[in-house]
Image (cartoon, grey):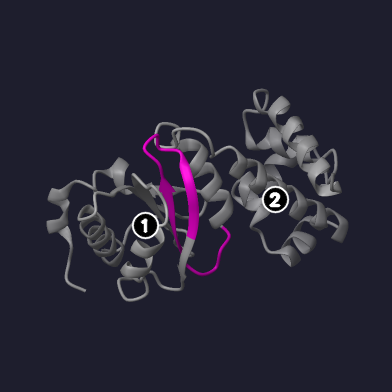
Amino acid sequence: MRIEDVFNMKMHSFMKEKQDNIKSDSQYLTLLSQWIKFEQHNENWQENILTKLGSFPHLFTYDKNQLIEEFNLSEKDIAFISLIYATSIRILKSEIYNKNILRFKKYLTDYLIAFLSRETIEHFYIILLDRNAHIISISHQASGTVSTTSIHIREIAKYVFKFDVESLILVHNHPSGIALPSEADKKLTYILVEALEAVNIDIADHIIIGNGIYFSFLESGLLNPQNKEMIMPL
């Protein structure tokens, strides 16, 4: 077994064990301080760090040089933060399979936020689901500004037809950090809904990832057919 696999297993077990006892960002920082040498000048050192970061997850998206300069961290500390981040992504991804992901969507949104929040350009993915809403495949479809011109409907359909797909989830990120749909996002969604509807494949949701947050077309009611009339001309 590879060293990284052993580390992943141990970290997964450790995080599972600690998860129920950790209720705040401050507690996460305290836990992480076992391996990372944060400056602890007073008893409120966690709050001082979080004030600068904004939140604990931002530790993993913060610029490396800023972490060194503002928090006096070493290259070793930065390397460990990167390792924790990569391991967390693997752990979160392992949790999204073999379950009804529409019923247990939090597993998916936690993974997508961790995976896409730090990206500086837009990426568009489709997640294929079977009749039990289990994930069959996750496919990257495009990078750059997401629009009807950058997304190739035929290529998506061609890929989907390779599998026994019941429905799919659209996913893309907003590098601005603001997880609100643009008119282009809405137009693309409804075009795909209509295109796949013709072959009996549903769009179960369109999830937009921002900075530590997400927006769901399903949860907001925007997948309601009546809302197609809300599209503004591009």
Dot 1, crowdedness within 10 Å: few (<14), some or many (≥20)?
Answer: few
- Relative image position of residue 25 (x, y in whole percent): 64, 37
Q: Kindly report which numbered mark, 1 or 2, lies closer to the viewer in this rendering.
A: 1
Q: Which residue is mark 1?
A: 161
Dot 2, crowdedness within 10 Å: few (<14), some or many (≥20)?
Answer: some
Instruction: Give whichever of discs 1 and 2 has the lower sequence position.
Output: 2
Residue 150, above or below 33: below
Q: Which residue is mark 2?
A: 85
Residue 15, above or below 63: above
Quadrant hosting residue 82:
bottom right
Mark 2 residue element: helix
Quadrant hosting residue 94:
top right
Q: Which residues are magenta?
A: 118-139
Residue furthest out toward the bottom: 149
In percent of the image, x 67 and y 53: which residue is there? Answer: 60
Residue 201 in the figure: left or right of residue 21: left
Which image quarter holds the N terminus? top right
Residue 173, above or below 224: below
| Residue 223 forms part of the magenta stretch | no
- Relative image position of residue 72 (x, y in whole percent): 82, 57
